[in-house]
Image (cartoon, coloured by chain):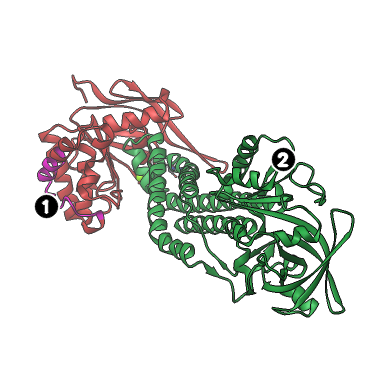
Chain colours: A green, B red
Amino acid sequence: MAIGMIMLAFVLSIMAGMKRDMINQGTSLLLGHMQIHAKDYRPDRSIYDAIPAGRSDLLGQLRGDPSVLGAAPRVSTFGLASSGNKSIGVEILGMEAAAERNVTILHEKLIEGSLPEPSEQSQIAIGELAAKALGVSLGGEVILIAQAADGSLGNDLFTVSGIFRSGLDLLDGGMAILDLGAAQSLIALPAETIHEIALRTASPTDAKTVASALERTLANPAIEVSPWQTLTPELSSWVAMSDSWSWIMYVIVFSLAAISVLNTMLMAVFERLREFGVLAAIGMKPRSVVALIVIEVTALAGVSLLVAIAIGTPLLRRVVGKGIDLSSFSDGFSVTGVAVGPIIRGDWVFGDFAVGAALLFVCAALAGLYPAMRAAAVDPARLTRGEIR
Amino acid sequence: MTSHSKPAVRTDSVRKIFKSGDQTVAAVDGVTLEIHRGEFAAIAGPSGSGKTTLLNLIGALDEPDEGKVWIDDTEITTLSRGQRADLRKDKIGFIFQSYNLIEVLSALENAEFVLLLQGVPPSERRRRVTEMFKKIGLEGLENRRPHQLSGGQQQRVAIARAIVASPSLVLADEPTANLDSATGAALLDVMQELNQEIGTTFVFSTHDPRVMDRASRLIRLVDGKIEDDH
Ligand SMILES: Nc1ncnc2c1ncn2[C@@H]1O[C@H](COP(=O)(O)OP(=O)(O)OP(=O)(O)O)[C@@H](O)[C@H]1O
Ligand SMILES: [Mg+2]
């Protein structure tokens, strides 16, 4: 039973850690905790559906809001990147490097150079797969062609200022990052026009409530604030799935604990039939015998809990502190568009574990009930007849 | 046997029938008797004559198929399992052939168990058991576990457990059968002393003629019937 409890704490911790990592990674790479768009922008992402408010005003208002820790304005479109005779389709993201740093960890994913800054010669950052496909390296030149807002075909020459590796093929092979101003001029948008503002808040877990509060504050029916759960339904369904896995774990651990209690106590009762016969003979009531065994089981569960805490705490401290290194198995993997690193760190799960342990007590007591009834049913007359050894 | 005191136990034409396969055995077959307070009665008879079965009936451990059993005016056949347990706890002490002490408890804890069930407070329990241990020669062995005691000592602890709560009646099924004759005789001395000093009522079964000689009353059973009672 102690093993069951350790297992429970262990798995809950890892699940919570993975969930935390998934949400953090999923939101911090590019998404942000929530995004602001024009109402019609998603899911078509037309360049004409810009946020119907001045960029400076809106950003000023957002940055003054205490629930917003970072706000990054963006424009976004699709285009063709080419170098020499090679070309690939790309998603083009125009951003402000300084603002982006407050919202996402894009800058941490650069393996060479830096994010594009406003400059004389327009800069571009591409993923390492795209760089390979185009045959360019840092300092190389890339031509971007994209449909502009005025109906013309915008095209510009960019110098590669940075190469990133996110672990996601979609980004590493098909994303071109530009400075916001450069992107706006490529697709002929005025400086005040943006498509998206990515936001970082205190915690991704309460993104939903913060998003709707923000929407109310902005009070513009043409603007919507979408939490990450809406932006990546895959991630939020993964999170929901991981929650249901936690439940399955509960059920498994509880069943194991209940079976082990049932088994142990039944054996113990059969070994002690004589004792229960004596207790009955000298006047212990059947229901006192039941109570006796239920108390024994609960005490057993208590000892198991102490053992579990004694053994489990240092184990968990390791899992939470250093994490479990899976790098010998894989370099990390991606789940629903989120890269998970090869080291999985757990999370402290006091609340969940306390509830689990309490339920385990109830479970143990219930499982002890049947053996208890068997013990209470021992006929003391069989003892004196010598039928119980 | 005539006595003016109320009987501790009375049976009226009790029968207990066992079926094994298509054979039925009347282990106790129409026994009517009264045991009075202060008696030191032996039930004797050959193996299979029904001694154990009769003791089970008058100890409210088993229910008769026919007839009635009264313990201190309480008719037991109408009682529930729980009520019979309470009756045993309050009125009857048991001494078993194979001691049947509880292995995980010390001698003192074993002896005070019935008092515990009766809800006697700890200090009072301890006082009464210590006094009893002194009386029956167990002084100093209070904290021993059953396996650290000899057979005779274990059976004395069992006697202490049976009588420390001052029951109306103490039942002992072949209490000396597992003991050598000297130890058995010493044990009987203890029982006899308690019977004479504090008037505890004893009913015990035995095969052993030397044990029967000690009894103030000898009930002989044959095939579940009383053959002789004097
Ligand atoms: N559970 C039972 N099932 C069937 N028959 C039984 C059962 N218990 C006792 N008997 C029978 O009832 C009769 C009386 O048994 P009991 O144990 O009372 O005799 P006893 O005088 O105590 O014998 P012993 O001196 O060997 O202890 C015996 O014939 C025995 O076989
Ligand atoms: Mg017998």
Q: Is residue A322 left or right of residue A195?
A: left
* Both marks 1 and 2 on one chain: no
Which of the labelled discs sits on residue B140, or is there none?
A: 1
The quadrant of the picture showing ligand 1 is: top left
Residue A320 position in % (x across, y down):
48, 62
Magenta residues? B128-146
Q: Is residue A28 above or below residue A351?
A: below
Q: Is residue B40 left or right of residue A314?
A: left
- State the residue position of label 2: A223
Q: Is residue A345 above or below residue A269?
A: below
Residue B165 position in % (x across, y down):
21, 34
> For this rendering, which residue is in front, A121 or B170?
A121
Q: Is residue A13 at all visible to an observer of this figure?
A: yes
Q: Name the kind of residue labelled 1 in the image.
A: Gly
Q: Name the kind of residue labelled 2 in the image.
A: Ile
In what element is the residue under mark 2? strand
In what element is the residue under mark 1? loop
Q: Is residue A188 above or below residue B108?
A: below
Q: Is mark 2 within 8 Å of ligand 1?
A: no
> For this rendering, which residue is in front, A342 or A206?
A206
Q: Is residue A105 left or right of residue B1?
A: right
Between marks 1 and 2 in the image, the one whose residue lies nearer the viewer: 2
> For this rendering, which residue is in front, A88 or A238?
A88
